[in-house]
């Protein structure tokens, strides 16, 4: 009769299996989601898992309150209020239309789209950019009679890649920035090179995969600039003032959540937009999803499984900073596609906190968890937004996306590891 290895037996006997069972069921439901076998979406599944952790006594009610990172929740809420005002001013629509008007060929349009969506995603959240840009891309490709697939894939992949560079780019970056106490400029300085190199690689990879659709070098005909965009200049000026203010506060090392909340409140006052319009544009589901996940992960930590995970990854994590970057990036690449990027970051949080080179490892966690979102259509919310909004005009199959997405993910992740390894050599951090 075979016996389990001696190192695993103590682990199995010391584990609390109830929270592990709740954790497993919760993440199966998150992975399945509604429309694919369950009537629960991600947020509902996470909320039910959090309630189960409290009802079963795994996490006390007070412990659940303490488990939630309110700094992260407040930070996201403040940024959402600011972004909502930008949306109402039609700033993103105006940018998309005028950038498209600059393109003279199909390839130029692809390049302009990738860099515009990527850079805007770094400061206005990738999901928001995909939400705003998808109908614009569909309208422009219709008007210019262009194939939609290359440009929709470009929008999804570039928004994920570009969001790497800033704490405001995506929820997992916000979580890392608040947890690891990065300054805004420190985060930007380290990961901007990763994002820009990633966007260049995205251009090259998509140009290869879609070379037939992009081969026509004839000048584009049509006038995308004639798509009506009613830009609210007065509101946009106020948004610009608020955005500049929050950047100044962050560069002066003010608290991320406090500065975001203060500027969000400031914008509600000077924006003169009905509060109801702002409330409808805030992603309350994402905030509930985050809060619920914090509780679920606290219960999972209480099970003892996280301690075992630290021991399991120890061989790859006990080396130098280069070894740790590869080990953590590989782990995040897999975890982000199994349980999504935000849960993956929460799962790795206690692991990274125990490492001697946690500064650069946290950067690897942020970049890899984001870049992993390009692997499949369901690897990131940004991908789902693009595909779902485009479904009425064109159908992008799972295989069509994956054959490009996997290559983009692997190549950009390897580039990210190489850049962070070089930075760690040139600018060692205590």
Image (spheres, rainbow, N blue to C red):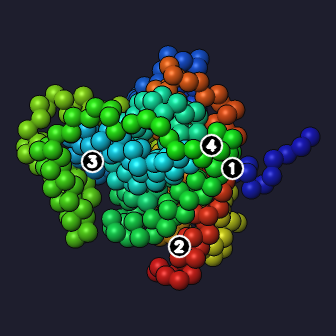
For label 4, the crowd category at 10 Å Cα-Cα, with few meaning under 14, some 14 to 19 and many 20 or more, is few
Q: Residue, x 39% and y 36% (percent of image)?
A: 223
Q: Is residue 401 something that shows in the picture?
A: yes
Residues at marks 2 and 3 touching, judged by CB atoms closer than 8 Å: no
- Which is nearer the N-term, disc 1 or disc 2? 1
Residue 216 is labelled as: 4
- Which is nearer the N-term, disc 1 or disc 4? 1
- For the image, the number of numbered tags is 4
Looking at the rendered image, the disc whose residue lies closer to the viewer, 1 or 4, is 4
Residue 208 is labelled as: 1
Residue 87: percent from left, percent from top: 26, 38
Q: Is residue 312 left or right of residue 149?
A: right
In terms of depth relative to the viewer, which is nearer, 406 or 108? 108
**Element marked by disc 3:** helix
Residue 46: percent from left, percent from top: 45, 32
Looking at the rendered image, the disc whose residue lies closer to the viewer, 4 or 3, is 4
Looking at the rendered image, the disc whose residue lies closer to the viewer, 2 or 3, is 3
| The N terminus - image quarter | top right
- Which is nearer the N-term, disc 2 or disc 4? 4
Distance between mark 1 and mark 3 Cα atoms: 36 Å
Distance between mark 1 and mark 2 Cα atoms: 37 Å
Residues at marks 1 and 3 touching, judged by CB atoms closer than 8 Å: no
Q: Residue, x 89% and y 43% (percent of image)?
A: 2
Q: Kindly identify which residue carries mark 3.
A: 79
In terms of depth relative to the viewer, which is nearer, 406 or 184? 406
Question: Which quadrant of the structure image shows residue 321?
Answer: bottom right
Residues at marks 2 and 4 touching, judged by CB atoms closer than 8 Å: no
């Amino acid at each position: 009769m075979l016996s389990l290895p001696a190192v695993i037996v103590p682990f199995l006997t010391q584990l609390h299996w109830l929270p592990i069972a709740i954790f497993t069921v919760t993440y199966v439901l998150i992975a399945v989601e509604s429309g694919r076998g369950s009537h629960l979406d991600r947020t509902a599944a996470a909320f039910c898992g959090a309630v189960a952790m409290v009802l079963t006594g795994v996490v006390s009610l007070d412990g659940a309150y303490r488990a939630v990172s309110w700094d992260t929740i407040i930070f996201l809420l403040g940024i959402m209020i600011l972004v909502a005002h930008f949306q109402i001013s039609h700033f993103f629509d105006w940018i998309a239309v005028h950038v498209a008007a600059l393109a003279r060929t199909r390839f130029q349009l692809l390049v302009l789209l990738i860099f515009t969506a990527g850079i805007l995603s770094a400061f206005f959240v990738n999901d928001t950019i995909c939400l705003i840009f998808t109908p614009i891309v569909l309208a422009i490709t219709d008007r210019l009679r262009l194939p939609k697939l290359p440009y929709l894939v470009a929008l999804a992949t570039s928004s994920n890649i570009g969001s790497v560079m800033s704490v405001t780019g995506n929820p997992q970056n916000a979580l890392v920035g608040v947890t690891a106490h990065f300054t805004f400029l420190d985060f930007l300085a380290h990961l901007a090179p990763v994002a820009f190199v990633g966007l260049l690689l995205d251009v090259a990879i998509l140009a290869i995969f879609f070379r037939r659709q992009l081969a026509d070098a004839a000048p584009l005909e049509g006038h995308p600039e004639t798509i009506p965009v009613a830009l609210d200049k007065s509101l946009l000026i106020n948004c610009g003032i608020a955005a500049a203010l929050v950047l100044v506060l962050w560069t002066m090392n003010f608290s991320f959540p406090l500065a975001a909340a203060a500027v969000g409140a400031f914008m509600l006052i000077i924006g003169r937009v009905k509060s109801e319009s702002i409330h409808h544009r805030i992603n309350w589901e994402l905030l509930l999803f985050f809060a619920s996940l914090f509780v679920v992960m606290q219960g999972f930590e209480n099970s003892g499984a996280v301690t075992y995970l630290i021991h399991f990854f120890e061989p790859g994590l006990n080396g130098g900073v280069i070894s740790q970057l590869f080990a953590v990036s590989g782990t995040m690449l897999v975890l982000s596609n199994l349980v999504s990027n935000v849960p993956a970051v929460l799962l790795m949080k206690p692991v990274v906190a125990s490492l001697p080179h946690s500064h650069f490892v946290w950067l690897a966690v942020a970049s890899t968890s984001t870049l992993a979102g390009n692997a499949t259509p369901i690897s990131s919310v940004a991908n789902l937004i693009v595909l779902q909004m485009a479904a009425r005009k064109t159908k992008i199959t799972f295989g069509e996306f994956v054959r490009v997405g996997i290559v983009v993910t692997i190549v950009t992740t390897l580039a990210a590891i190489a850049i962070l390894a070089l930075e760690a050599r040139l600018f060692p951090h205590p």
